Amino acid sequence: MTTPTIHVGIIQQAPYIRFTLHGTFRTASGRTLSGTHRAAFAEGALTLDGETCTRLAFTPADETASFTLEQVTIGHSFHWQRQEDQTFTGSLTIIPDADGMTAINDIDVESYLTSVISSEMRATSAPEFLKAHAVISRSWLLAQIGRRRGPQTQAAHPDFRLTDDEHIRWHDREDHDLFDVCADDHCQRYQGITRAMNPAAAQAISETRGQVLADRRGHVCDARFSKCCGGASEHFAACWDDRDPDYLQPVRDCPPPALLPDLTREDEARRWMTSAPEAFCHTDDPAILSQILNDYDRETTPDFYRWTVRYTQAELSRLLRERTGTDFGAILDLTPLERGASGRIVRLRVVGERRSLTIGKELEIRRALSPTHLFSSAFVVDRGEGMPPQEFTLHGAGWGHGVGLCQIGAAVMGARGYSYRDILAHYYRNTQLLTLY
Ligand SMILES: [Zn+2]
Ligand SMILES: [Zn+2]
């Protein structure tokens, strides 16, 4: 197998696209081209610098060529959204679509991953942690490509289960139509060669070239990960549809022989979340945390292994009304009906004076109980004085869905001298490393 090429969507819905070719590129008709140009799509006609053409595709004549796209929007709908010029290697294709134009960068998977890991990971990270991340990013990517380009065997399954009494939804990433992945956080953030390359990340990619995580049948794993498991990782079905992949089994996040208590039970979940058991991700080492969390997250969220959130009755009833669209009246109780293996709540009963409703799965619960996102759905609830109670306190564990690799735990393992093979085998049971190319 040769190195696969990936199609990355960079700009969408632009009325026109301005770009600069550095070095020599070949057009679809075989002409050579360089310099700054403008592509537009209006009244059914595709134009390059005002001249009608049939196809806009630009292939570099040699490896030193690159191109710059003007005013690329990054961080769609995040608090740091902004526009900037970005530079890429590989080919550029611009295609018209229903809303304007889409710029697509065709690039080999290894160069793409070098860029992604460079911007996601700090150069100070332990090399073995970076290698583990390189393998899971590659696995995730090749699993996506395989699914999107492969035969459409999967029947579309609904991502909700709604009755009058129960609202259960889950949110998995939707595939793109025109390309394999987008350049934003929806897939993996990709900024071409705009940022300086991180040499440690580039080395992790080249040392694991072509390596993917596969299940026992040899299928590439959809290798999920989250920031901090809270001491135990979670089943896939607690967060998404009711599948139970062999390679995403709950793991107690520390060296053997520590056992995972039965956190689906309320008494065990309470003991777990109101104490701070040993775990790889139980750390406050700033050198480790700076590898995973950006400065903004580190300042605003110092405690994520065990955390506490308090709401007054007025705050909680308003929040739940705004976030779920349901007027519960005064909130009488929040009752967990079902927990996953990590203690994450899968179905939560909101008991109100006017009405009650069961909500799930984990992301819906996190959205309902915070103006943004609660750190995780692994929490126990203490009701304050009175009826209705005057306040509610949530004692919680971890940050994110908790399925697959725990980034903070993996960074600690890397710093303690575990190899990337050990790290991957710890978080993904029943797997093997395969070298595809
Ligand atoms: Zn995407
Ligand atoms: Zn962990």
Image: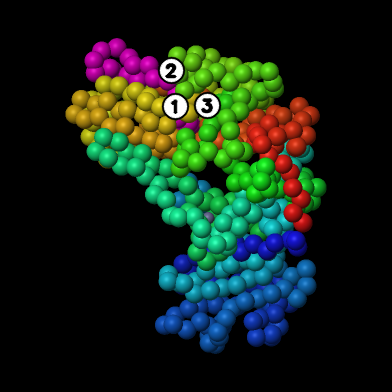
- Along the line of sight, the residue nearer the viewer: 225 or 258: 258
Q: Is residue 362 magenta?
A: no
Q: On the rendered structure, is 386 left or right of 96?
A: left
Q: Which residue is mark 2?
A: 266
What range is drawn magenta here? 374-393
Q: Which residue is mark 1?
A: 339
Q: Please state which amino acid type lies under the numbered disc 2.
A: Glu
Label 2, label 1: how many angstroms apart (C-alpha)? 9 Å
Q: Please state which amino acid type lies under the numbered disc 3.
A: Ser
Residue 188, position in %: x, y?
59, 51
Residue 150, position in %: x, y?
58, 61
Mark 2 in CB contact with mark 1 (< 8 angstroms): yes
Label 2, label 3: how many angstroms apart (C-alpha)? 12 Å
Q: Residue at x 53, y 34 (%)?
A: 235
Q: Which residue is mark 3?
A: 342
Q: Please state which amino acid type lies under the numbered disc 1.
A: Arg
